[in-house]
Image (spheres, rainbow, N blue to C red):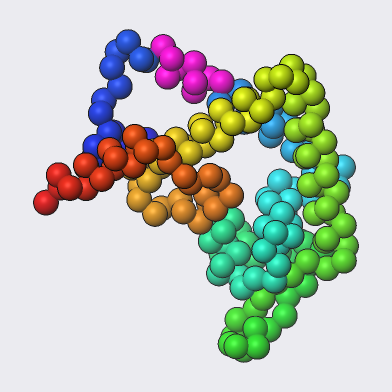
């Protein structure tokens, strides 16, 4: 990530903590990915296919362009992904009534079952993780994680405004008053 704009360079004294945050986040992501891989293997889909099913489960029928943008993948990758999901009976494509040259994609009943199963397994795993945290600290851990997600979203906006908005839709976006005040001060100082 960049340190452009109003972001101040990281003081040397904060580097050890930043390195620890990076190691912790990487470890967290990798562990959840291992769990996700185990979940998708049992359902007979790839990680990319599972992500597609997840988006269609949440959003419903979508145009191919909107789906590709939401997933952050190229049209050719999306097409291959959808071909496999269609062959397995998990999605269907229909001509867009508003534009005969375009297609829309939706989950089939089979796709809904797989997407529901994947979501349930992921929620179960998250529940297992929470169960290992003392009950009196769980709410604080979840709140701190949400605060971290807000900071990550804000940092990506500083680095690349609007570049990742479509990938961040499920992430919290509210920022604290100190962050908002700083952003306002930065915008006011630019010419």
| Magenta region, residue range | 16-24
Q: Position of residue 162 (x, y in %)?
A: 39, 54
Q: Nearer the viewer, residue 26 or 170?
A: 170
Would residue 54 be visible to someone looking at this image?
yes
* Quadrant position of the N terminus in the picture: top left
Residue 10, horizontal then vertical, whole percent: 30, 22
At x 41%, y 37%, the residue is 176
Looking at the picture, tell me which residue is in the foreground, 126 or 103.
126
* Residue 187 pos. (x, y %): 21, 48
Q: Is residue 44 at least partly visible in the picture?
A: no
- Seen at 65% across and 78% down, the residue is 103
Residue lying at 61% horizontally and 70% vertically, measured from the top left:
64
Query: In screen coordinates, is 184 left or right of 81?
Result: left
Please name the predominant secondary structure of the magenta segment in the image: helix
> In screen coordinates, is 105 left or right of 169?
right
Whether 53 is drawn above or below 122: the answer is below
């Amino acid at each position: 990530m960049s340190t452009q704009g109003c972001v101040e360079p990281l003081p040397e004294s904060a580097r050890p903590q930043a390195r620890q945050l990076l190691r912790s986040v990487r470890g967290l992501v990798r562990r959840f990915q291992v769990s996700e891989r185990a979940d998708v293997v049992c359902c007979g889909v790839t990680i990319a296919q599972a992500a597609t099913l997840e988006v269609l489960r949440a959003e419903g029928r979508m145009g191919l362009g909107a789906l590709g943008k939401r997933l952050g993948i190229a049209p050719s990758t999306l097409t291959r992904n959808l071909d496999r999901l269609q062959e397995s009976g998990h999605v269907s494509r229909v001509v867009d009534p508003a534009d005969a040259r375009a297609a829309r994609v939706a989950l089939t009943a089979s796709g809904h079952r797989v997407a529901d199963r994947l979501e349930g397994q992921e929620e179960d795993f998250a529940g297992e993780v929470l169960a290992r945290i003392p009950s009196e600290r769980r709410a604080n851990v979840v709140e701190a994680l949400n605060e971290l997600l807000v900071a990550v979203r804000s940092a990506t906006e500083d680095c690349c405004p609007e570049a990742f908005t479509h990938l961040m839709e499920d992430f919290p976006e509210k920022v604290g008053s100190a962050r908002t005040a700083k952003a306002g001060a930065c915008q006011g100082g630019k010419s």
